[in-house]
Image (cartoon, coloured by chain):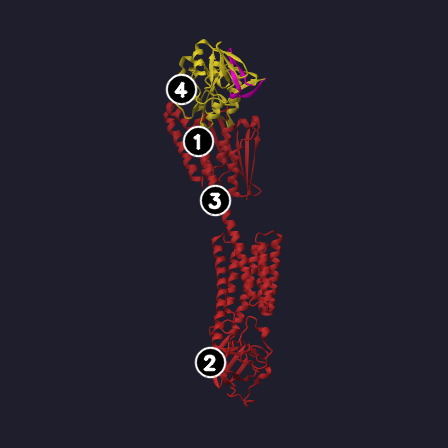
Chain colours: A yellow, B red
Amino acid sequence: MRILIVEDEALIAQRIERLIREILGASLRQVVVKPTIESARTHLREHPLDVLILDLNLNGKNGFELLTEAVSGAFQTFVISAYTDRAVEAYEYGVLDFIAKPFNKQRLQKAFDRYDNQHYRAAYPIQFLAVRKNQQLQLLNISDIAYLRGAGNYAELHLTDGRTALHDKSLRHLIPLLPAHFERIHKSFIVNFKCVEAITNQYEIRLHGGTRIPISRSKYKALKDRLG
Amino acid sequence: MGRFWAVLFCLWSGPVLWGQATVLSIGDTPEILPPSLWRVCDASGGDPPVVPCTVGLEWEADPIPERAFHWCSIQLDLPSGEEAALAVFVSYGTGAVTVYWDGRLLYENRRWGSYSNYLPLSVAESQPGKHHLLLQVSDLSSEEATFPRVGVGTLEFFAGRVRYLNHRLIFMVAIFLTATLFFLTFYFGFSRKTSFLWLSAFGLTNVFKAILKPQQNFFSPDWLQDFQNYESIHLAVVLGAVALFGFILWEMSIPRRRWWLLGFAAFGLLAYSTISESHFLVWSMILSTLGILYGVRQKSEGAPWALVAMGGLMLFTYLGYRDWLGFGYFIGIIFFLLCMTISVGQKVAQQIRLRQEASLRSASLENQLLKKSIQPHFILNSLASLQELIDQKPAKASDFVERLAEEFRLVNKVSNKKLIPIADEIRLCQIHLQIMEYRKDAHFELRTEGLSGEEAVPPGIFHTLIENGITHGYGNRRRGQFHLRKVRENGHVRYIFYNDSEIAVEEGQSQSKGTGLRYLEARLREAYADGWELKSGAVAGGWQVELILKT
């Protein structure tokens, strides 16, 4: 696992790094500490990553600057901060876990458990998904997404108004972030159940507007019971 | 009222009613007996009165040598009707008087007389029919002989009259005394504002003036003769005018007011022996009004009320002078004091409000420093660092906790003060740097230059600059230099605070934005009002903040 720690307090950064090493052991491939937003941004651009661990107040600057960019990435983000009043906001932007300072090994362990077991939902569902379009970051409201289609390491977001967008996270990484009414009905599809009109007999779900989405056979019965 | 004519003694509006009758008649108002009724006493007696004219009595005050004694013999015919005791009223402030009624000596004073004196007669002496009133007088003060006002009426009427005058006097004295104490209390209670003291003195001079007024029978001990009363009143008027002028000088913040006051006092003393009381009053009112008009022009806070008060005083005094209003001058003074009471009340209310605001501001600053130093973010990050120290370097953990405790203790000690010794402030900065050294695993150094340690500064100001410096300036670096230098220049004190932070140089951005700078400015305003200036900006190799205290 490749991890980037963005923390401006040396002692705390050292603590996070030490605990991660203890938790992940051999599965840790790389851990890097950056004390400023700028150096972290450079690192993110140049190195692939699995987990970003981010402090929200970095040298007097707002860590949310980086958060918006970070959550659009293919990796998952944990926030470690003293500003617990910003936890809900952080979740809304798509972090997988929010760890309050001070923290112990068990709490950090729990965050990595959540990462490993993607069927866990985040403690608080996201409100927005940040997507990159023409080199610009754009925040999409979750309620505007009708369904998501997997495309390798990416996900296509299909919006209710017909527009589409590409997200850097795979479906596997996205599902724990999304609210409960988003459900994976197929290896390649996550559907917003608020947009579902009916289930058909052809192993398909019909959305408002007529779009049909396939259901995997293993999920068909449960869905039929639920929607039928 | 049948035969019980009340003789109206119109001191209140007397002069209008005087002087027409030539013969004293019962049921009429008191009159000045015309000179034609008075005869000069000599040894041969002239037209002898019923009782012998006494010549050569030893008066307590020397009569004017060439002044003869005068006598006046009056026959009265009292009409029949109800029986009641009568009294003879004699008002003769300027000379000695002897009164006989039906040949009996009724009164003899051998000294300066009284303005208000009634002589009771028994019921037997008040029977209807013919009676004889004989008066002998000698003017002890005027060059020309003056004669008393004389009247006869019921004893009940005169007694009631005197009671009424006394009550009115008590009322006035009570008002003046209340005003005196009111302004004195506010002088001591609120910032010792000198103009309040002058108002109090003005009230007190009027207390004396009212008590000494010879028309009253309120306070007339034998030792205090009426002529002394006049002198005392004149003096009270001069002192009152000085106090009033002093009030205006201080209230309107007139420049060089001590000299003005000295000049006015000299004028008062000169006027005391050269011009009449009324002339002096006119001049003092004109000068006081000019002072108030200066205040109005300068938009002095108390000027509008002072102008209204002075206008009223002049108006009422004029009405009194023209006999259109009895006791006009005193009513004017009461009006003046009333206006000033309202004005002072407003001022005090405003002062209370300002004090409350200032105290709230201080409380808020105290809270800000406490909050800034023990804010959750600072504590929680420190605790997270502490966790790591406990796990990895337990010996240092203990030291770290001690540093934290010392910073909290110091902040708690200084936060409620307006100014603290700079030594305490430097200590606070050093402890904070030590804490941050642990947390950032860095080395910070604070050097000072030109400080004696005794200088007083608002709490937390350099501490705030250090906090800002560390927060914004040392993201990538593990070493930091802070330098505080004090310089005296053109009578000003300059504190120059420098740090070698990287971010200011790299990005040229301000280190002092946000709550830190707001806190700093609020503390400086509280301690020095407008006498400070704060400059900050990037300099070679770092960031510099300059605090200039204008002394």
Mark 4–mark 1 CB contact (< 8 Å): no
Q: Secondary structure at mark 4?
A: helix
Chain letter of the residue beneath label 2 in the structure image: B
Chain letter of the residue beneath label 4 in the structure image: A
Task: Please report whichever mark, 3 or 1, sits nearer to the chain's N-terminal start.
Answer: 3
Q: Is residue B404 visible?
A: yes
Q: Which disc number belongs to residue A110?
A: 4
Given the image, on which type of amino acid does mark 4 rest?
Lys
Given the image, on which type of amino acid does mark 2 rest?
Glu
Q: Is residue B387 above or below residue B530?
A: above
Q: Read off the residue under disc 2.
A: B83
Label 3, label 2: how far apart the Cα atoms are:
75 Å
Q: Which residues are magenta?
A: A134-160
Q: Which disc number belongs to residue B376?
A: 1
Chain letter of the residue beneath label 1 in the structure image: B
Confirm whether circles 4 and 2 share one chain: no
Label 4, label 3: how far apart the Cα atoms are:
49 Å
